[in-house]
Image (tube, rainbow, N blue to C red):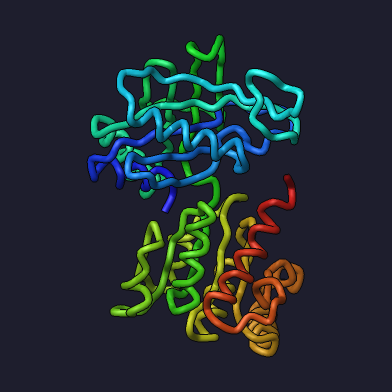
C-alpha cells in the first residue's frame, strides 16, 4: 500500500485525514521534500516526515487538529537545531523544513480515486496543494518532480508530479514472484507481474502487482518497456523459458536485468545464447545469479536479496 491508497481507503470509510507533506527542506533535515504522512481520525498512521521527536509532535498536533473545527491549512516551519527557539523541532541534526498540514474528508475522495487510477494505468498526475486548495491537474505537462513557493506560513503553494519513478517487471509469477511483488510494492515501485500459465494460484493471489498479464513469452518485448527506470527480473519455472526471455531482452536498455537460477543453469543458458549470436559482453551485464549473497533459502529471503540488489543499483548514482 502507498500513502495514496491509505488515504483513499480512509476517506472511503468516511474517516477524516490530516495530510502532511514536506513542502521544502534545507540542510540536514531528516525529512526531505516530498516526504508525506497521513494521520486518520481513527488514529492510524501511514508514511513519514522524518521520524524522531519532531514527527511524534506533528502526529499529536494532527490528532488534536482533527478533533477541532474550521481551521485552515497551514505550513509549520521546523528548525533542527538545539539553539533554535520558537520553531525548534527538538532535533539537533541541523537544517530545517516546512510541513504542510491539510485536512481531508469525504469531499476529497474523488481526487484520491483518480490518483489511484492514474498510478495503476501509468498516467502522470500533478497534485497542487496550497493554503486554500487541494487539487489535481490532469493535463499539466512539466519536467519538475516538486515545486514550491512560500510567501509565509499562511500563503504558499506546493506541486508534485505523482507517478511511479521506478517500474519492476517480474517475469514468472510463482512463489518467489509473489514475495518479490510484495517487497517491491513496499518500496514504491510499480509492480508488473507476468506469466504464461493460466489458473496459477500464486498469480491469482497476487494482490500486490499493479498490473498482471498472462502472455506468450515469444511476445515479451511487446510488454516490457525500456528505460533507465525499468528493472526486469526473470524467474520463470523453466530454464527453456528463461533462455527464451533473456535472449529477447538482453540487447535492450534497462536499469537492471537479472536472472534467477543456479550458477550451473545460468552458465548453460549463457553458452546457448552465445551460440545463437548473443555477445558475451551483453550477457556479462546481466545480474546472474540474481540477488545479493545472503544465503537466502525461502521465497521471502530470496525476494529481499533481489530487492536489495535493485535498491543498490537504483541508488548508485545518487
In-image side of 112 versus 311 (left or right): left
Tell me the quarter of the picture where residue 233 sits: bottom right
Quadrant where the N terminus sits is bottom left
In the rendered image, residue 7, in percent from the top left (x then y), is placed at 36, 42
Q: Residue at x 68, y 69 (%)?
A: 286
Give whichever of 295, 83 is nearer the camera.
83
Q: Residue at x 72, y 76 (%)?
A: 293
Q: Residue at x 51, y 64 (%)?
A: 183
Give whichever of 248, 24 is nearer the camera.
24
In-image side of 170 versus 260 (left or right): left
Q: Is residue 197 visible?
A: yes
Give whichever of 68, 196 is nearer the camera.
68
Tell me the quarter of the picture where residue 283 sits: bottom right
Quadrant where the C terminus sits is top right
Give whichever of 247, 36 is nearer the camera.
36
In-image side of 214 versus 150 (left or right): left
In the rendered image, residue 160, in percent from the top left (x then y), is placed at 50, 30
How many marks do you count on the picture? 0
In the rendered image, residue 80, in percent from the top left (x then y), is placed at 70, 29
In the rendered image, residue 84, in percent from the top left (x then y), is placed at 72, 22
In-image side of 8 versus 36 (left or right): left
Q: Is residue 275 visible?
A: no
Tell me the quarter of the picture where residue 175 sits: bottom left
Q: Residue at x 36, y 41 (%)?
A: 40
Amino acid at each position: 500500500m502507498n500513502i495514496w491508497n491509505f488515504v483513499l481507503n480512509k476517506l472511503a470509510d468516511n474517516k477524516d485525514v490530516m495530510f502532511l507533506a514536506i513542502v521544502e527542506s534545507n540542510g540536514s533535515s531528516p525529512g526531505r521534500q516530498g516526504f508525506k504522512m497521513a494521520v486518520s481520525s481513527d488514529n492510524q498512521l501511514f508514511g513519514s516526515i522524518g521520524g524522531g521527536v519532531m514527527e511524534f509532535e506533528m502526529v499529536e498536533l494532527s490528532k488534536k487538529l482533527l478533533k477541532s473545527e474550521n481551521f485552515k491549512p497551514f505550513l509549520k516551519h521546523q528548525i533542527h537545531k538545539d539553539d533554535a527557539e520558537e520553531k525548534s523541532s527538538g532535533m539537533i541534526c541541523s537544517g530545517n523544513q516546512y510541513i504542510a498540514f491539510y485536512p481531508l474528508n469525504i469531499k476529497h475522495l474523488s481526487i484520491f480515486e483518480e490518483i489511484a487510477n492514474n498510478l495503476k494505468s501509468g498516467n502522470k498526475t500533478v497534485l497542487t496543494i496550497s493554503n486554500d486548495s487541494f487539487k489535481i491537474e490532469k493535463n499539466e505537462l512539466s519536467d519538475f518532480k516538486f515545486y514550491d513557493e512560500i510567501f509565509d506560513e499562511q500563503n504558499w503553494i506546493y506541486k508534485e508530479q505523482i507517478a511511479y519513478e521506478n517500474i519492476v517487471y517480474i517475469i514468472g509469477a510463482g512463489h518467489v514472484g509473489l514475495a518479490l511483488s510484495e517487497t517491491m510494492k513496499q518500496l514504491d515501485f510499480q509492480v508488473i507481474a507476468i506469466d504464461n500459465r493460466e489458473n496459477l494460484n500464486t498469480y491469482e493471489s497476487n494482490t500486490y502487482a499493479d498490473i498482471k498479464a498472462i502472455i506468450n513469452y515469444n511476445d515479451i518485448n511487446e510488454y516490457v518497456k525500456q528505460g533507465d527506470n525499468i528493472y526486469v527480473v526473470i524467474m520463470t519455472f523453466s530454464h527453456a523459458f528463461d533462455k527464451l526471455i533473456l535472449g529477447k531482452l538482453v540487447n535492450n536498455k534497462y536499469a537492471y536485468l537479472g536472472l534467477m537460477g543456479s550458477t550451473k543453469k545460468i552458465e548453460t543458458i549463457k553458452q546457448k545464447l552465445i551460440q545463437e549470436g548473443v555477445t558475451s559482453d551483453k550477457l556479462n551485464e546481466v545480474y546472474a545469479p540474481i540477488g545479493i549473497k545472503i544465503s537466502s533459502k525461502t521465497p521471502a529471503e530470496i525476494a529481499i536479496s533481489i530487492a536489495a540488489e535493485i535498491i543498490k543499483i537504483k541508488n548508485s548514482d545518487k
